[in-house]
Image: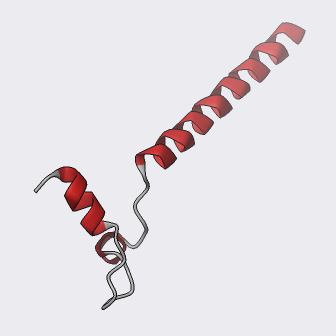
Amino acid sequence: MSPYALHGYRTSVHTSTRATPYSLVYGTEALDESEWVRSRLEQLNLIKEKRLTAVCHEQLY
């Protein structure tokens, strides 16, 4: 079975349990790749902002 088919099965809500198999096993819903990438980019941007703030503070002293 292809990884994409497994992902689809594991993240589809089943009528008998009203939940996804993934959420029943891990206690949380799976993230799509696009959501993960967006979250990661936000984290990297925050790090970049903190670094720039530190550089600005360093230049003041």
Quick check: 56 left or right of 41? right
The image shows residue 33, relative to residue 24, as above or below, that is above
Residue positioned most to the bottom: 16
Q: How is the image coloured?
A: secondary structure
Residue for point 72% across, 26% down: 49
Q: Quadrant of residue 23?
A: bottom left
User: x, y (%) of residue 50?
Assistant: 71, 27
Lateral position of residue 34 relative to residue 54, left or right: left
Which residue extends farthest right?
60
Residue 47 sits in quarter: top right
Q: Position of residue 9 (x, y in %)?
A: 25, 67
Q: Quadrant of the C terminus?
A: top right
Residue 45 visible in image: yes
- The answer, for residue 61, to whether it is visible in the render is no
Position of 40 compared to 7: left or right?
A: right
Q: Is residue 40 left or right of residue 9?
A: right
Q: Residue at 55% of width from left, 44% of height from top?
A: 39
What's the residue at 34%, 88% (across, down)? Answer: 15
Is residue 33 positioned above or below 41 on the image? below
Q: Residue 24: x and y, percent?
A: 33, 78
34 shown above or below 48: below
Q: Quadrant of residue 25?
A: bottom left
Q: Which percent across, then down, holds residue 56?
A: 82, 14
